[in-house]
């Protein structure tokens, strides 16, 4: 079959049913072929960053690698921020960019460039296909690489004339790959955990990605261990309503060190140890703590802090093996769980009283807004979060036990949330999706709203509008040495004149509304399951933050 036919055949055999992209001249052979490929839906984005973020959400929702089509050097550059997010969040995707016609590449044509060089820093692998016979092999290799730990995006540059060649190429069969096995040496880790007086577990995003949440819960309950989420976790890696859950570790070494100082043994599972955001002096791991680690990626074992024992293997069978080696719950486990239950109830009662006490009219208090959303959502809702100020509060008030109910990117590239929410709902049409977005973050990916309208994707987009870059102001004031500078800023306000979100919805064809109270916000959140199309909602919030800390 011809190269373009081989490409479509491989997509089908890899369970790809959507192509996310924004086309240009170099993609015309693909666009032409898709006319008759009625089983492959082309999801059009107005800009490449939106296409990549939609593919990110879709891959996470389906558990399969997604497929993205970008356009030449400029398109790859536009998509780089999404590729960086996908790489940091370990989202499997295959990204193909159309290169200029090889017959005049030597003349440095417009739109051409070093696509591989551009993509290399943000992908697992970046290769340019130089002859048609290699295309099927490289595509097969790309899909295999995308899911192999550590998962991530894989990039292929494909010249447009290569896709259009009238030559016969062979399509290799898809290789069968057995699931990963449990690590060796689980007995040593089990003994150390069982002997610990104050054990803790840090649940990383590998737990959720590899379907190991239930296995981790079983192990934690046999030990009565306190469980933290990794800093800025991307998903549900431990049920947030569980009595042993003690919140997310903030992304600062000094605070992590303080939280872990109450423990003598800490098990890291499926997480990078540790990835801080703001600098604070000193290490994240307290002196004297016995550090243990389990990961499917050998490169994650002990890169920053030495571990007493490091296990490399698939997380679910490894955690199951560790729990089996621990055996029956240790004698002190029941007491630890009961004390944790009482402490968690007290923390929640305080948080609930504070949030309810701040309810009222717009502009809404950030904690009260987060509480209104969290307590009104339908039970099976997926929350896609890219709201830096409100997002911290939201993590503290959401109680989600179902895996894949929370979607975030630790990559930090803004503009991801709108597209990710669209892709999430496309991948999980059986679950309501609510995107909680900062107004600044939403502006980076605003074009994605057009795709939501075009494809009639029923997502509730909640834009938390405080008219400023609040997190930057908070950080700046924390670090300022002169009190006379505090409260004075340059380049951190979006007002005046502010952003007209009703006009934004009208521009892209979405219905919009503005909430005027916490009760109205709760009503909107509760209605997420009944949408038949997208809804853009402006949520005015106060331009300050004095919030109560999240549980933990």
Image: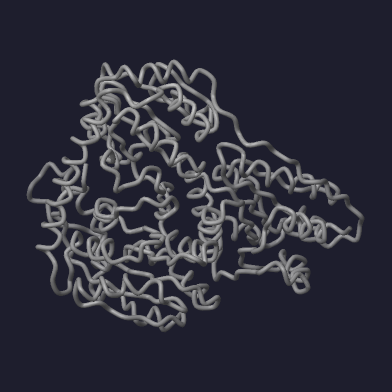
Describe residue 302's horizontal placement relative to residue 454 as left or right.
left
Q: Nearer the viewer, residue 6 or 499?
A: 6
Residue 303: x percent and y percent? 44, 25
In the picture, the quarter occupied by the C terminus is top left
Name the residue: 70% across, 59% down: 98
In the picture, the quarter occupied by the N terminus is bottom right
- Above or below — where is 411 with respect to 1? above
Quarter of the figure with residue 178: top right
Residue 385: x percent and y percent? 37, 58
Residue 377: x percent and y percent? 32, 65
Name the residue: 57% across, 44% down: 152
Quarter of the figure with residue 546: bottom left
Please, which residue is most extreme toward the left here? 484
- Above or below — where is 148 with respect to 523? above
Q: How many numbered marks does the figure carry?
A: 0
Describe residue 37's horizontal placement relative to residue 249 as left or right.
right
- Above or below — where is 417 with respect to 548? below
Describe residue 81's horizontal placement relative to residue 516 as left or right.
right
- Above or below — where is 194 with respect to 515? above
Way the structure is coloured: one colour
Describe residue 478's horizontal placement relative to residue 94 as left or right.
left
């Amino acid at each position: 079959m011809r190269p373009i036919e081989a490409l479509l055949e491989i997509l089908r055999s890899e369970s790809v049913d959507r192509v996310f992209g924004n086309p240009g001249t170099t993609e015309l052979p693909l666009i032409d072929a898709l006319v008759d490929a009625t089983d492959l839906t082309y999801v059009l984005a107005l800009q490449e960053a939106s296409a990549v973020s939609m593919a990110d959400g879709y891959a996470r929702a389906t558990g399969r690698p997604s497929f993205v089509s970008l356009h030449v050097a400029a398109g790859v550059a536009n998509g780089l921020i999404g590729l960086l997010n996908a790489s940091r969040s370990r989202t499997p995707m295959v990204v193909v960019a159309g290169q200029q016609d090889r017959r005049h590449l030597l003349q440095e044509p417009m739109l051409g460039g070093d696509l591989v060089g551009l993509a290399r820093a943000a992908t697992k692998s970046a290769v340019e296909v130089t002859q048609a016979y290699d295309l099927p092999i490289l595509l097969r290799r790309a899909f295999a690489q995308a899911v192999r730990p550590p998962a991530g995006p894989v990039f292929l540059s494909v010249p447009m004339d290569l896709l259009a060649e009238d030559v016969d190429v062979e399509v290799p069969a898809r290789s069968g790959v057995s699931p990963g096995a449990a690590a060796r040496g689980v007995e040593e880790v089990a003994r150390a955990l069982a002997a610990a007086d104050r054990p803790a577990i840090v649940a990383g995003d590998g737990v959720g990605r590899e379907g190991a949440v239930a296995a981790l819960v079983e192990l934690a309950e046999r030990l009565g261990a306190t469980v933290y989420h990794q800093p800025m976790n991307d998903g549900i890696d431990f049920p947030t309503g569980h009595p042993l859950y003690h919140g997310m570790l903030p992304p600062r070494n000094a605070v992590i060190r303080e939280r872990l100082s109450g423990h003598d043994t800490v098990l890291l599972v499926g997480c990078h140890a540790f990835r801080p955001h703001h600098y604070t002096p000193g290490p994240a791991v307290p002196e004297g703590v016995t550090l243990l680690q389990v990961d499917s990626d050998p490169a994650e074992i002990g890169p920053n802090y030495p571990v007493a024992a490091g296990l490399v293997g698939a997380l679910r069978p490894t955690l199951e093996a560790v729990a089996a080696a621990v055996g029956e719950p240790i004698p002190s486990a029941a007491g630890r769980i009961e004390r944790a239950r009482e402490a968690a109830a007290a923390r929640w009662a305080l948080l609930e009283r504070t949030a309810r006490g701040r309810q009222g009219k717009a502009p809404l208090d950030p904690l009260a807004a987060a509480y209104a959303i969290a307590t009104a959502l339908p039970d099976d809702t997926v929350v896609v979060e890219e709201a830096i100020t409100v997002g911290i509060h939201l993590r503290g008030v959401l109680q989600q036990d179902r895996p894949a109910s929370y979607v975030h990117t630790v990559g930090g590239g803004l503009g991801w949330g709108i597209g990710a929410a669209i892709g999430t709902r496309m991948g999980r049409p059986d679950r309501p999706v609510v995107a909680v977005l900062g107004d600044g973050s939403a502006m980076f990916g605003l074009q994605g709203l057009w795709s939501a309208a075009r494809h009639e994707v029923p997502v509730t987009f909640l834009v938390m509008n405080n008219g400023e870059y609040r997190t930057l102001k908070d950080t700046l004031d924390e670090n300022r040495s002169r009190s006379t500078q505090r409260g004075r800023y340059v380049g951190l306000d979006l007002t005046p004149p502010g952003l007209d979100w009703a006009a934004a919805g009208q521009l892209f064809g979405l219905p919009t509304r503005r909430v005027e109270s916490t009760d109205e916000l709760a009503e909107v959140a509760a209605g997420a399951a009944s949408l038949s199309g997208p809804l853009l909602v402006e949520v005015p919030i106060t331009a300050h933050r004095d919030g109560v800390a999240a549980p933990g």
